[in-house]
């Protein structure tokens, strides 16, 4: 997967990497059991401190998004969140609240907001389907 | 907490009547990449020379690995490597001779790293060093600094005067080859004013001005605290309480604010006046350095 960092976003660089992996996982551009780039080449390519990449991977591991296989690297885990459903929803509500507040300030009304949410959900679902189709095709080609 | 790799307390160094460094403090923790920023003549090189016992402090203390570089010069120098801005080699030596000569002072020298870097930089070991370009000389010096795998790498304006490709390679080498071994134990202290290139590498920094601390912060904290807000109103800007803004620039219906902390509150206040457009971004470390003259003196 391709990463990019933006020093002007105000978000710590390691969290930018965390978000990008989570986004890639949600949109299917990173599939379960697919490897993440190893730390050294990624740090060199982005010209960031190796500790920054290591910190991002540690964070992703503690969130249960990826797993480290010693000597092999980091891999995306299948999506089995260890948190209870209620807890997961509570975490999501926090994120939604932020978007609601942002919508208020941008003067986007409730109906439009809900429309936008639906649209984005469909966007991600389409991406996942397309990704799954592509990977079936490629594995079919190898067989 | 572990002993800082570098600890400077109240360092003063005078040249005649001129205070090049005047009461400087800083501490660098192990495994960090520490930026040391300042304008020409701010006292950066003088400070670094005190770390290396190339100069003795007029007052104050300097500790490297917890040791006094004046009294325990060998113990300090055997664990660090230094790349200065102007590199002088013996002109009659080849690249190979030069690296062997540098290696002869070291207890440990990683031949494999040396070979990999010679290859990466496309350097011919049989070439005489006086025939090398400035960029190539810097590359040889960098190999000489990384191959002994020191605990501390001190870089003084290492990339000034180099072309952008060589600069980029230099930084990637520091990340890959130097930090590659055991990033936790490898500390970098880099003085530069080409800050944007080192931005991603730097964990923490000190800006020094006229030999004194102006600002010391973690990079992530700095980027969170220092922001630029651009806002445009439909009519003339309403009367605003802009307390907390470091700097305000006004052009007709537009305002540009530099903020040091209090970002959310200020943003809230601006939004209350329903601006036509509102944009906010963090200052990069380089931009922060450029506006550091606006900061209150400590």
Image: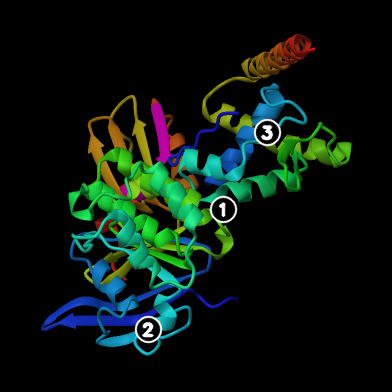
Q: Which residue is mark 3?
A: A22
Tell which residue pokes out farthest to the front in this image. B126
Check if residue B151 falls in the magenta segment. no
Separation of residues labelled 2 and 3 (CA atoms): 49 Å
Specify start and end residues of the magenta stretch as a single range: B277-286
Q: Is residue A66 left or right of residue B168?
A: right
Q: Secondary structure at mark 2?
A: helix
In the rendered image, the vertical position of residue B122 relative to residue B20, given as above or below: above
Q: Is residue B84 left or right of residue B40?
A: right
Whether residue B152 sits left or right of residue B90 in the image: it is right
Same subunit, tags 3 and 1:
yes
**Mark 3 vs mark 1, CA separation in Å:** 19 Å
**Number of residues whose C-alpha sits closer than 10 Å to that of mark 1, classed few (under 14), some (14–19) or many (20 or more):** many
Q: Badge 1 sits on which subunit?
A: A
Q: In x, y percent, where is residue B33?
A: 46, 59
The disc placed on residue B296 is: none
Give the foreground label among 2 and 3: 2
Residue A130 lies in quadrant: top right
User: Which residue is rendered at x = 22% and y = 66% of the image?
Assistant: B42
Q: Which residue is drawn at the image coordinates 40% and 82% (left, top)? A: B74
**Residue named by callout 1:** A51
To which quarter of the image does residue A135 belong? top right
Question: Residue B16: image x %, image y %?
Answer: 11, 84
Along the viewing direction, whichever of B103 and B192 lies nearer the viewer: B103
């Amino acid at each position: 997967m391709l990463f990019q960092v933006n020093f002007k976003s105000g978000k710590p660089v390691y969290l930018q990497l965390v978000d990008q992996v989570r986004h890639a996982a949600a949109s299917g551009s990173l599939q379960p059991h697919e490897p993440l780039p190893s730390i050294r080449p990624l740090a060199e390519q982005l010209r960031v401190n190796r500790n920054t990449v290591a910190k991002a991977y540690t964070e992703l591991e503690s969130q249960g998004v990826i797993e480290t296989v010693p000597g092999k690297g980091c891999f995306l885990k299948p999506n089995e969140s260890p948190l209870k459903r209620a807890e997961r929803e509570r975490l999501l509500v926090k994120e939604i609240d932020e978007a609601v507040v942002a919508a208020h300030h941008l003067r986007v009304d409730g109906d439009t907001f809900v429309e936008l949410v639906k649209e984005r959900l469909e966007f991600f679902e389409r991406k996942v389907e397309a990704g799954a189709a592509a990977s079936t095709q490629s594995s079919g080609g190898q067989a | 907490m572990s002993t800082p790799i570098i600890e400077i307390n109240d360092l003063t160094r005078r040249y005649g009547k001129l205070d090049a460094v005047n009461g400087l403090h800083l501490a660098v923790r192990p495994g960090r990449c520490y930026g040391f920023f300042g304008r020409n003549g701010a006292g950066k090189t003088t400070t670094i020379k005190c770390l290396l016992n190339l100069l003795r402090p007029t007052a104050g203390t300097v500790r490297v690995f917890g040791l006094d570089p004046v009294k325990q010069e060998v113990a300090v120098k055997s664990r660090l490597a230094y790349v200065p801005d102007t590199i002088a080699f013996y002109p009659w030596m080849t690249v190979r001779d030069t690296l062997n000569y540098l290696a002869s002072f070291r207890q440990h020298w990683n031949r494999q790293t040396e070979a990999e870097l010679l290859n990466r930089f496309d350097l011919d070991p049989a070439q005489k060093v006086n025939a090398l370009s400035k960029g190539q000389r810097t590359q040889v010096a960098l190999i000489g600094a990384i191959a002994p795998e020191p605990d501390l790498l001190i870089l003084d304006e290492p990339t000034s005067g180099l072309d952008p490709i060589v600069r980029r390679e230099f930084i990637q080498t520091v990340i890959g080859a130097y930090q590659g071994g055991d990033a936790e134990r490898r500390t970098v202290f880099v003085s530069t004013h080409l800050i944007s290139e080192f931005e991603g590498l730097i964990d923490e920094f000190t800006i020094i001005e006229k030999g004194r601390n102006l600002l010391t912060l973690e990079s992530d904290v700095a980027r969170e605290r220092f922001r630029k807000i651009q806002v445009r109103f439909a009519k003339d800007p309403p009367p605003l309480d802009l307390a907390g803004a470091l700097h305000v620039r006004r052009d007709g219906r537009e305002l540009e604010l530099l903020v040091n902390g209090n970002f959310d509150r200020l943003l809230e206040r601006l939004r209350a006046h329903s601006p036509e457009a509102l944009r906010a971004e963090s200052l990069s470390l380089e931009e922060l350095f450029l506006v550091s003259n606006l900061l209150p003196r400590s």
